[in-house]
């Protein structure tokens, strides 16, 4: 069931950096979201704990209906952030979908037992510690892409030869399997999710944004 009519101009959720707030509000679109609370009784009847439904509903309140520009990896990420019925068990933990893929994929995007944003491939692979981290990574990629003088894509085993000595992790992306690194004049994004989740080391990829000044390195 569709939610009430909303403005297509999104208001960025709290707890994002200024760079990510600007990214969401300038580049995002908010569309009507489904009201997942109307499914509560049916989902509980199928054994989904009430607390997990509440967790999915909280995600929907915060992120539901938000469409963002495509990510530079994972075939662009979810088309629209949108929760659905939680799945799992007491032993393995509960997760719920984060939104449909833009294209046909070998995995889906999920929110994990502790709020992680990740992919459900051959195995559950958390990419960022939260949805905020995922959105921060999108914002940083868009920012770095505008300011970089060079963008180099490195794939497969060549990624392992990257020397990140002197680089520091970019904290706001809350990286787990995927991470961002900041150096003197460059930013490096490491995309390990498909390599880990699909047992496919050839899918490992790094994007190196070079020739950045202070504004380009940090932004917002």
Image: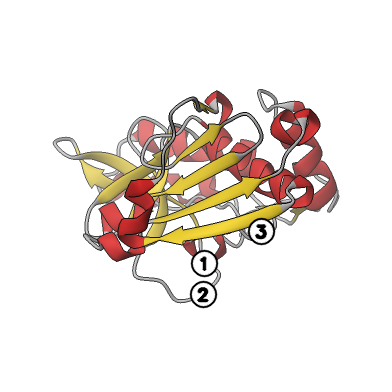
Marks 3 and 1, how far apart at CA: 27 Å
Residue at 68% across / 43% down in the picture?
139
Left or right of 169, for residue 105: left
- Up-down: is 176 above or below 5? above
- Up-down: is 43 above or below 203? above
**For the residue labelled by badge 2, is the local secondary structure a helix, a strand or a loop?**
loop
Q: What residue is disc 2 on?
A: 103
Whole-percent x and y of residue 84?
Answer: 46, 53
Q: What residue is disc 1 on?
A: 75
Whole-percent x and y of residue 31?
Answer: 74, 56
Quarter containing the C terminus:
top right
Q: In the image, which disc is placed on residue 2?
A: 3
Q: Compare marks 2 and 3 and give the one earlier in the sequence.
A: 3
Whole-percent x and y of residue 155?
Answer: 41, 61
Residue at 48% across / 33% down in the picture?
130
Marks 1 and 2, how far apart at CA: 7 Å
Residue at 32% across / 35% down in the picture?
113
Left or right of 73, for residue 106: left
Exactly how many numbered labels are in the figure? 3
């Amino acid at each position: 069931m569709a939610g009430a009519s909303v403005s297509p101009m999104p208001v960025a959720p709290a707890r994002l950096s200024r760079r990510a707030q600007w990214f969401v509000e300038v580049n995002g679109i908010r569309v009507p979201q489904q009201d997942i609370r109307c499914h509560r009784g049916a989902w509980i009847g199928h054994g989904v704990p009430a607390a997990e439904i509440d967790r999915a509903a909280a995600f929907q309140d915060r992120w539901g209906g938000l469409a963002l520009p495509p990510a530079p990896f994972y075939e662009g990420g979810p088309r629209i952030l949108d929760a659905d019925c939680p799945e799992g068990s007491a032993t393995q933990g509960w997760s719920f979908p984060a939104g449909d893929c833009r294209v046909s994929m070998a995995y889906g995007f999920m929110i994990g037992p502790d709020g992680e944003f990740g992919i459900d491939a051959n195995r559950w692979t958390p990419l960022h510690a939260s949805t905020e981290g995922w959105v921060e990574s999108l914002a940083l990629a868009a920012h770095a892409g505008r300011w970089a003088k060079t963008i180099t894509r490195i794939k497969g085993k060549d990624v392992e030869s990257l020397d990140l000595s002197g680089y520091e992790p970019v904290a706001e992306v809350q990286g787990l399997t995927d991470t961002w690194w900041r150096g003197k004049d460059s930013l490096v994004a490491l995309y390990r999710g498909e390599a880990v989740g699909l047992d496919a080391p050839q899918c490992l990829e790094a994007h190196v944004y070079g020739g950045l000044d202070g504004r380009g390195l940090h932004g917002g």
